[in-house]
Image: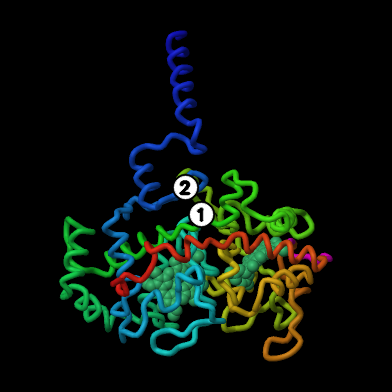
Amino acid sequence: MLRKLLFITSLLLLLCSCQESKTQLVEDPEQENIRALLALPDHMPLPYIPKYNPLTKEKISLGRRLFYDKKLSANQTQSCGSCHFQALAFSDGKVTPTGSTGQLLARNSQGLSNVLYHTTFTWANNTLPDIEDQLQIPIRADAPVELGVTDQYIDEVLARFSTDPVYQTMFAAAFPEDGAVTMNKIVFSIASFVRTMISANSPYDQFIAGNDYAITPAAKRGLALFNGEKFECFHCHRGINFSNSYRDINTDPVAISFEFFNVGLYDTDSTGSYPRIDQGLYEVGFNPDHRGMYRPPTLRNVELTGPYMHDGSITNLRDVIKHYSDGGRNVTTGRYVGDGRYSPLKSALVQPFSASEQEIDDLIEFLNSLTDQDFITNPKFSNPHQEP
Ligand code: HEC
Ligand code: HEC
């Protein structure tokens, strides 16, 4: 017994000594491989990767090529990259985008920083646990059309890739067992590429990694406000990704909860309705209590992902903060007149508070410290079709 104890103690000591320089627990080779493929720095937790789609460098490079290839839309006019631009942290700067057939979408294009830590995808959906599930929508959906690869077009689209020698080689390398081009393989590869979109070298990251001078005193004041009980931001935007939607390799899948919030942007009928075109989580199960509920988006690179909110209805960060300090939005003109501040469905965490211009400036300075220049210029994420 004693010998066993001693053995355990020495093992612990051993573990501790090799951990000295690392904040993470000792990782097995498979986990180290994931960390290497993602170029994940030590301060970022190991993500969850579904077992059915292990990460490989071949899938990642195939996924990158597909992400930027307009052949992936039925009429060959759009790729994923048409709505997700690297320079804008993979958002598109528009209020809401237009799909490949010209249909205007109801929702603002999301940035794609650190998407792999989310527990469910899009602005408001609790039925898409993996990126693989979500990607069916932009590729396959017909209402609204994004890339428009509906059943009618699927064979034609797959043939574009299976007859292309570059893709033949890449599919064979990514799926050595059977390199035939299928929609699943396309989705698995693009999901693998999207997982590599890690933003972890902003001034804020450098600050939490130990460089006290990486962010300004104003940004530090802003961070304190963000995490304080007056502004309340951290209740919904928390953790490494500034969202409540979070899982990593250690998260128990059974314990995952999906919290969505109504932040009082609208109340078109005094019972809490949002504009009919999009009522958030309500669209998934038509539960009237879910009207106006959305997932708190990540705030990483938020300086670059405006206009803001699910419908792009707030132009800049100052106005977003004023929205919160007003305790919601009173829409006084136009089609959606109504006072979101008094919506019965608004989250109790969104209450009016007084914010000085100085405090708002500080908070914006903090939010801007989440902008990661490496992320938006990293050649790993750029369009490979444009390489010399
Ligand atoms: C026509 C514009 C458009 C195209 C094309 C498009 N997207 Fe999107 N993307 C959006 C919009 C809008 C949303 C938000 C959708 C929602 O909330 O319903 C989104 C959401 C996402 C998300 C969810 C992010 C999150 O944080 O949950 C991912 C991932 C994504 N897109 C990746 C892709 C990939 C990969 C492709 C190509 C297969 C693609 N998109 C094509 C506009 C587009
Ligand atoms: C009750 C939870 C909650 C609180 C508290 C909260 N947020 Fe949000 N935040 C959300 C949700 C949900 C959305 C998306 C709402 C929508 O689109 O309808 C959002 C959206 C945003 C956006 C837009 C991001 C984008 O990409 O469009 C910013 C910026 C933001 N919040 C910052 C803040 C700040 C700063 C605070 C503190 C003053 C704060 N939030 C407090 C839940 C919250």
Q: Is residue 351 magenta?
A: yes
Which residue is found at the position 56% from the left and 71% from the top?
305
Secondary structure category for the residue under label 2: loop
Q: Which residue is mark 1?
A: 200
Q: Quadrant of residue 33?
A: top left
Task: Give how far across and how far down residue 7 sits, in percent.
Answer: 43, 15
Sequence order check, earlier mark of 1 and 2:
2
Residue in front for this viewpoint, 284 or 19? 19
| Residue segment shown in magenta | 349-354
Which residue is found at the position 22% from the left and 81% from the top?
156
How many C-alpha atoms fall within 10 Å of the one at disc 2: few (<14), some, or many (≥20)?
Answer: some
Q: Main secondary structure of the magenta part?
A: loop
Figure quadrant of the N terminus: top left
1 lies above or below 36: above
Decide: marks 1, 2 in contact (CB < 8 A)? yes
Number of marks in picture? 2
4 lies above or below 272: above
Q: Which residue is mark 2?
A: 41
For this orientation, the residue located farthest to the top is 2
Task: Give how far across and how far down residue 182 sits, in percent.
Answer: 23, 68
Q: Is residue 215 magenta?
A: no
Which residue is found at the position 76% from the left and 60% from the top?
231
Question: Can residue 137 be seen in the rendering of this structure?
Answer: no
Q: Amino acid at mark 1?
A: Ala
